[in-house]
Amino acid sequence: MEAAKKKVGCKGKYLGDYEIPPLLFSGLKEALKEFQEKAFLDLGERERNNRINEVLLSLICQESSCSFLLIAIIHFIDEVKRANLLEHYSISHFELWLNQFSGLSSDENYRIRAKIVGKHVPRAAYQTLFPIGRDKIYPGSHFVTAHSSPDVDTTIASFWGWVDAFGARVSEGMHIWNVPGGPPSSQMEIPLLFHSIFGSGIFDHIAKTRSFLSLSSLDLMNQKGMLRKKTEDSFLSIDQERDQKAVVLVDDAGRFIGDWLPVDVEEVRLVVNLLSICLRWFASNLHVQLISLFGREDLSASDLPKFIHSFFAMKIVDAPPMKDFTEKQCGYLRDSLVKVLHLPRGLGSSFEEYAHAMKRLGLVEFEDFIDLIESLQTSALFDSKGRLQEDRPTLFKHLEKIVRELDRAIASVRTYLDSIGIGFKIKTEVFGYLPQMISYRADLEEVRQKMDGFPYLTVTFPAKEEGFLPLGVVHAAELYRTTLGTVTLRDFCNREEMRIPSYLEVISVIDHHKSALLTTSAPVAYIGDAQSTNVVVAELAFRINDQYSMGAMSLDEIEKQMEEVQKDLVAPSSKRILQRLLQRRLHAERKGEYFVDPVREFVEYLHFLYAIFDDTDLLSKLSMRDVLCVISLINRLKSLLLGREVEIIRVDDLLQDGSFVEQAAQRILQHSDVYSLYRKIYLSKEKAVEENIKLCVEGKSSSFFADTKEQNGCCRVGQAKMFSRNVPLFFKHVDPLRTKWLLEAIEANREKSELDLHLLMISTIPSAEDLFAGEKKKYLHKDELWLWIPATEEGIEHLKGFLNAFSTEPVVVSCQKEMEVEFFGENAKELEAVFQESFLPIPNTQTQLKEKTISLAVLRFPAGRMNSRKEMVTPFLPRLVI
């Protein structure tokens, strides 16, 4: 357990002062030197990729068994990209190599993953998060995705979902983190929690940004039964039918030439056998003719040239076996002679021309045989006058040699024709079957279309020099399974939002919204009554970590603190601390190889805390469950930094009545450690709101309206949060801001006519200083809800349905006397009528807009009273009925 003694370390007095130190591979400098050497730079694309992955694996193996190497790996990928060593390289490329080319066993693969993610626990422990009981591994790739228009909550929840899925090895293929459209650039937490800890390349090197999920050939590819063969290898040595091999032909540089299918063997054998039949007839006929020749009484040496010329001048087409071949077979044989053996006259070629052609192809045995026949006239068989001598032993010795040499010549031709290279030429040039391959980027539909009866297809990648490199094969038998891959959802629970196809099975869900999901097998699903998904994610992380984490303490330090705590167990906090220490001691005494790296644990908890801060508007909207989770996170973070169990926030003295949550939240926010965390984010957010308002008004790219979601098929709902310091600037530019939002809503409706109810919440949230001081600021302005619908019956019905339901919300009812509504545009009267019919009676006014064709309603209510879109708007939205 030596590695478990590693400390997180502490710089500064408060939690917010701590910065994660750069965690790099100790052998990185030497590795980078190798990549600059000529020997490496002279390698081809495939060899470079293999070597870079081998070096990365070696660096991982050299590090301590208790490590969190994801940060170091991202930096390594940065260096590979910066040096332009490979055109494409990411953690997915390394994982592909790790799974299919490294040669590691499953256990070794799992241990490497554990060092990358900073957590080595029994795989069964991950059953808390994924349905992997009885050591189940799913086929294909596994996606962990955030929802569309991602916010901080879904980005963080999906990131740690990916980390856990990668560590657990949920699937046989790759584990892919998907953040639709990229990270939420408008959120100040992203640079702090991702770029500053993992490096600016984290999203480029790890995440995909797909707006919908689908499979590519890389996700379907494997090495099952794949054989790379050179052209000189014999196809007779491969029993593809029995062994179910997928044979891929490559050149000396490993580049793709083509595939070699079981059906190719039969067709090529047909052509080879046709030529063999002719050659065997030639051999048999020669035996007969030679015996007949040497049986003549008056044979002289001068008769041999005439015999040789007449015999070898015979055309292949005149060989008797040709009469038994079908027209199609004759055509195959003709094309083989012309296109493969380079005999321009084809079947009209003589056997002598055939022999010369073989010599040009490097097969000298046939010409050697002709030379041997021609040498007979000068041999000892004839006397000085050229007459045949009566010397039977010598005669039969020469005949035996002739027969042997002819057999050798025919055998050499057969060996040559049995090579995969010649077989491939016959396949392509005689039968016209072109090489089939698919790009590594090909989607599922393209793969299915190209498969078209083939047993497999080769997946290729463009070589840097020229040609393509074979990566693996996709088997037809596996292409039409019901499930081709799996998905983990974080912060949403439906297929529609990410257009998840039926061939991807959802197996894991953590969410805190309204959910709708149909699966073919039991998923692991947690739908929690919490304000933030990361409350549920954190609770599940606690469940695993508490069994295997040492909390940045050694066994001696645990026992020492236990002695101290046991001296006074009156306070409830002392009992809780002792309980946690006992759990850590229990793990230490197991003496196993399992660990949770303290740096990983600290970063994980820090992420969860900031996500909860964001989704609860800094604890202004939360429940008891949320509060208790936040307290646990803060105490755990401080304990990891100090290397001892502490509780810096306790609420044992508070009555758990109706005011408990509010009092506990205030105590949390007024703690100096917590203030040090949220102050820097909130100051940045205030500045960002101001900048984005100005950019929006100037017509430049702005994220003021970025937090917008499509919901229930017909609604488009956004929320823009601001602080009291931003209010004057907002109202100064409110008219151009409304116009900008209206134009975006109209454009969204033009693209998707079913989106006919558009809402935007303008919400005021407390500043960091107000929260730390514990002041409840009474705002002089009012927050707003903007509403726009197109002039359609469906739009009016959807607006009426929303207003009817919204008017029953308790907070709305309590604010009735302080609410007002203003109607803009030429349809103001129609909108007023809708409100009078479907909403609470409140004061209203009408205002004309310059753009007469644009109409909207602005509902105003006390600032800070309605800040939760999820709780106060989403439940009342209408649903599109198809």
Image: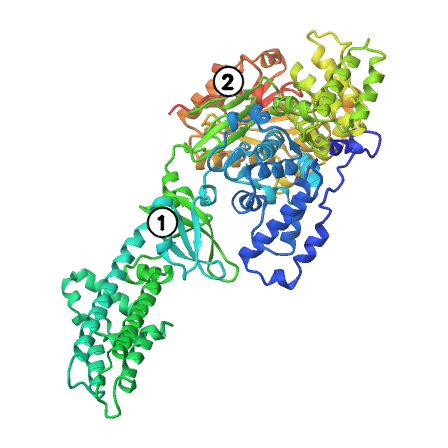
Can residue 531 be seen from the camera position used here? Answer: yes
> Looking at the image, can residue 858 be seen?
no
Residue at the spot 74% in from the left edge and 42% down from the top edge? 22
Query: SS of the residue at dot 1?
Result: loop
- Residue 778 in the image, given as x and y percentages of width and height: 73, 18
Picture coordinates of residue 313 (x, y %)?
A: 21, 79
Residue 721's place in the image compared with 361, above or below, is: above
**Residue 318 shown left or right of residue 122 in the figure:** left
Amino acid beneath label 2: Leu
Residue 194: name its quadrant. top right
Tag of residue 803: 2
Residue toward you, 753 or 137: 137
- The residue pinned by badge 1 equals 239
Establish if 608 lies above or below 47: above
Mark seen at residue 675: none
Residue at 21% across, 88% down: 387
For mark 1, does the 10 Å Cα neighbourhood hold few (<14), some (14 to 19), or many (20 or more) residues? few
Inter-mark Cα distance, 1 to 2 = 72 Å
Q: Could you tell me which secondary element the residue under label 2 belongs to? A: helix
Q: Which quadrant holds the N terminus?
A: top right
Residue at 64% from the left image edge and 32% from the top image edge: 120
Colouring used for the render = rainbow
Find residue 277 and report its horizontal and vertical position in percent.
Answer: 22, 63
Relative to 1, residue 297 above or below: below
Residue 411, picture quadrant: bottom left
Give the side of residue 654 with respect to residue 424, left or right. Answer: right
Is 92 on the left-hand or right-hand side of 119? left
Q: Is 488 or 611 nearer to us in this picture?
A: 488
Q: Amino acid at mark 1?
A: Asp
Mark nearer the N terminus (1 vs 2): 1
- For the residues bearing labels 1 and 2, Cβ distance under 8 angstroms: no
